[in-house]
């Protein structure tokens, strides 16, 4: 029996290797083709995109800096997806957090920083959670698909930002659609102020907050009863319900926590990078968070690695604009290709593995085993 | 009082991309596949349709280019979700990221991103001719009838034919069967994989045409963020329409009416005080409200989100 198991394990390892190899070849073929179209040598381009940013201290710190917002959004997405709650509204929740941070940041001139910073983080979390509340309630109370409602609230959030910037918050001096600069006490300090080893860079407190949040989320998800319930709901709502878990309450809380983390991402961008609200405060960090969460396999260590990888890619893509004249938009293409190929490869691996075990083919991803339109009556205790 | 005629005319115009999208998404979801790649497919249709028209000088060739891009996008979605059985939510969102990225990348290469390349847009039609002075009833009817050919095509040909194919032909029956109960369809001799590929490719072509309508007819140029969430609106309209093409089109008309009213009120005396952004946000809020009121216990296709595997 032991031998048999060992052979199966080796089989799986071999198969995983083959699938991974296929995935890498596919990614290289697709992105390499795009680099050639852009008129660059693919090898130079890969070096510029992935290796060059890691070779100098300044760009290395910038990698961490670029990773900061997507570490937040990746965590927010991963927590929600783990519970089978498809929160695709992280982009809008982030914007609401940014609005809250810019609002408070304008009011706290002269306040002590140790009071202001926690206040801003709390307000941003609250704003993000509030923006996540309506879709979550519609889902658990009425069974309305949260994919649609969270998606549709993203443009609404952007319009609120624009209404503020073209209306009450328009910069009175320049007339630009930018909010007034936040008070000095409301700025996230750069890390070089605390850690003498770090050279001058934009890297700020937000990065530390993001990493701490990931550690907490990892601990909760993998080491506590709450985490177990979240994972159980994601794997099978029906099974979780049989086990006595309050599925609706779990989903609601997960949605709010996810929104809160997204909101903190907005705070971090306003307080650490922009120092004001701008229309471009998020170039799609909420959507990149989905890529980070999926590349990370919806696990917290995975999110950390994937966030840093995409931070690396982001710095590489912007420096390759100058060094190799590759349009920066190619960075998004590489990112999306990574996502599609990895998702496809994982699907193949799970299918082959489940077939070998002669288990009924499962669905590969944590998915609700009931349609989103499930009447809530069946779920409430009777 | 040309106010209502203007709004009605704008409603049909603004509904057109949504109608093509709704027809396309209804086909894919009826086959059991949620295609969140719609936003990217519409975007790629808008860009590549425009680019083809720009380089050939013919907007109708541009439309053909968009259709080809839509077919490819649909086939890619099918490769991921039908052949590989990958998660539909993530595949669709990933497809959207890739297609928007590719369009903007190509836009950068072809038009240096910022340059304002323009084409001669498709002409407006006046099938009824002149019916009288503006302001008279005849003039108002003529205002409403003053539409692009693709709008006429959408409402008079595409919607009824797409409905007829889906509900009355063997192909439509197969599409609905693989979306409702693929095991039974397989036993009945239907090739589930092939039918899902066909549905996703037809759907992708319609989505791309919806996007191309904006560049080839409405604007005559391509701008960044041109789809601006219309694809997500379509996802909502399909649920609102309970996977019926006619109900989905009705939803598209309601959305477009609110949208057009908002645009019109911007230039109407007495309404200047309302921020433009509130008017633009209103249609999204209405869609969410409509879902909240009518989206309870909707009958999702039986195999919605489920990959099919022969065991």
Image (tube, helix red, strand yellow):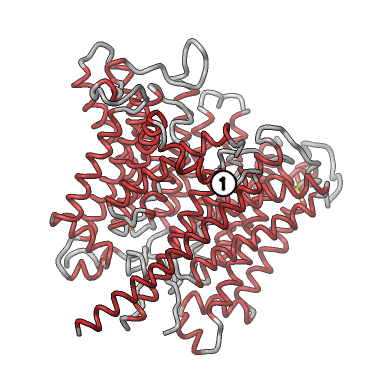
x%, y% of residue B62?
76, 52
x%, y% of residue B151?
72, 53
Residue B108 falls in image quadrant: top right
Residue B300 visible in the picture: no
Q: Which residue is mark 1?
A: B101
Q: Is residue B69 above or below residue A382?
A: above
Residue in the image at 59% along x and 66% along y: B75
Observer-nearest residue: A21 or B3?
A21
x%, y% of residue A241?
20, 67
Observer-nearest residue: B78 or B149?
B78
Residue in the image at 33% along x and 44% along y: A132
x%, y% of residue B281?
49, 38
Residue B9 falls in image quadrant: top right
Residue B97 visible in the picture: yes
Q: Split into 4 quadrants, where in the image is the N terminus of chain B?
A: top right
Observer-nearest residue: B244 or A95?
A95
Residue in the image at 51% along x and 40% along y: A48
Q: Is residue A324 toward the left or the right of residue A245 in the image? A: right
Q: Chain of mark 1?
A: B
Residue B276 falls in image quadrant: top right
Looking at the image, the residue that sits furthest to the bottom is B188
Q: Is residue B89 above or below residue B183?
A: above
Q: Check disc 1: other Cα within 10 Å, few if <14, some if 14-19, many if 20+.
A: many
Mark 1 lies on a secondary structure that is helix
């Amino acid at each position: 029996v032991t031998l048999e198991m060992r052979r199966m394990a080796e089989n799986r390892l071999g198969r995983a290797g083959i699938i991974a190899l296929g995935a890498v070849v596919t990614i290289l073929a697709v992105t390499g083709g795009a680099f050639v179209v852009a008129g660059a040598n693919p090898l130079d381009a890969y070096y510029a995109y992935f290796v060059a940013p890691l070779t100098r201290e300044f760009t290395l710190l910038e990698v961490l800096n670029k990773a900061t917002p997507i570490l937040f959004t990746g965590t927010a997405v991963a927590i929600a997806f783990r519970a089978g709650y498809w929160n695709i509204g992280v982009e809008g929740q982030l914007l609401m957090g940014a609005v809250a941070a810019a609002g408070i940041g304008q009011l706290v001139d002269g306040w002590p920083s140790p009071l202001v910073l926690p206040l801003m983080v709390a307000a941003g979390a609250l704003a993000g959670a509030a923006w996540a509340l309506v879709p979550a309630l519609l889902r658990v109370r009425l069974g309305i698909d949260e994919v649609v409602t969270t998606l549709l609230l993203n443009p609404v959030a952007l319009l609120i930002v624009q209404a503020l910037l073209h209306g009450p918050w328009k910069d009175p001096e320049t007339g630009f659609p930018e909010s007034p600069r936040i008070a000095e006490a409301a700025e996230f300090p750069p890390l070089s102020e605390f850690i003498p080893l770090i050279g001058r860079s934009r890297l700020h407190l937000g990065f530390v907050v993001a990493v701490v949040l990931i550690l907490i989320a990892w601990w909760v998800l993998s080491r506590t009863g709450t985490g177990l319930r979240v994972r159980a709901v994601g794997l099978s709502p029906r099974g979780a319900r049989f086990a006595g878990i309050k599925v609706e309450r779990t989903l609601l809380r997960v949605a709010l926590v996810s929104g809160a983390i997204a909101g903190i991402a907005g705070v971090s961008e306003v307080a650490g990078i922009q120092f004001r609200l701008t229309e471009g405060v998020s170039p799609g960090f909420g959507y990149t968070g989905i890529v980070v969460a999926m590349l990370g396999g919806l696990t917290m260590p995975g999110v950390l690695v994937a966030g840093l990888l995409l931070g690396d890619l982001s710095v590489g893509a912007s420096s390759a604009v100058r060094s190799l004249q590759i349009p920066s938009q190619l960075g998004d293409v590489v990112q999306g290709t990574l996502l599609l190929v990895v998702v496809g490869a994982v699907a193949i691996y799970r299918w082959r593995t489940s077939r070998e075990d002669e288990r009924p083919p499962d669905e590969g991803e944590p998915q609700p085993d009931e349609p989103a339109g499930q009447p809530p009556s069946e779920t409430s205790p009777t | 009082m040309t106010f209502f005629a203007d709004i009605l005319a704008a409603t049909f115009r603004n509904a057109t991309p949504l109608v093509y999208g709704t027809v396309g998404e209804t086909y894919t979801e009826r086959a059991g596949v949620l295609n969140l790649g719609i936003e990217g497919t519409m975007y790629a249709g808008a860009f590549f349709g425009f680019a083809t028209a720009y380089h050939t000088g013919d907007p109708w060739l541009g439309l053909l280019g968009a259709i080809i891009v839509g077919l490819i996008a649909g086939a890619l979605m099918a490769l991921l979700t039908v052949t590989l059985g990958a998660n539909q939510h993530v595949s669709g969102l990933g497809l959207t990221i890739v297609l928007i990225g590719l369009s903007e990348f190509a836009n950068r290469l072809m038009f240096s991103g910022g340059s304002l390349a323009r084409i001669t847009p498709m002409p407006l039609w006046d099938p009824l001719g002149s019916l009288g002075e503006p302001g008279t009833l005849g003039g108002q009817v003529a205002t409403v009838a003053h539409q692009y050919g693709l709008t006429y095509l959408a409402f008079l040909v595409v919607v009824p034919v797409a409905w007829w194919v889906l509900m009355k032909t063997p192909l439509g029956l197969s599409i609905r069967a693989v979306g409702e109960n693929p095991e039974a369809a397989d036993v009945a001799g239907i090739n589930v994989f092939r039918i899902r590929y066909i549905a996703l490719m037809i759907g992708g072509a319609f989505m791309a045409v919806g996007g191309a309508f904006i560049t080839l007819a409405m604007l005559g140029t391509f701008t960044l963020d041109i789809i601006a969430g219309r694809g997500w609106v379509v996802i909502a309209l399909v649920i609102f329409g309970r996977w019926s093409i006619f109900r989905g089109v009705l939803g598209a008309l309601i959305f477009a009416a609110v949208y057009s009213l908002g645009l019109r009120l911007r230039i109407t005396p007495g309404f200047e005080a309302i921020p433009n952004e509130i008017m633009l946000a209103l249609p999204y809020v209405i869609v969410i409200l409509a879902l909240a009121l009518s989206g309870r216990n909707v009958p999702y296709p039986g195999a919605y989100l489920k990959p099919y595997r022969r065991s």
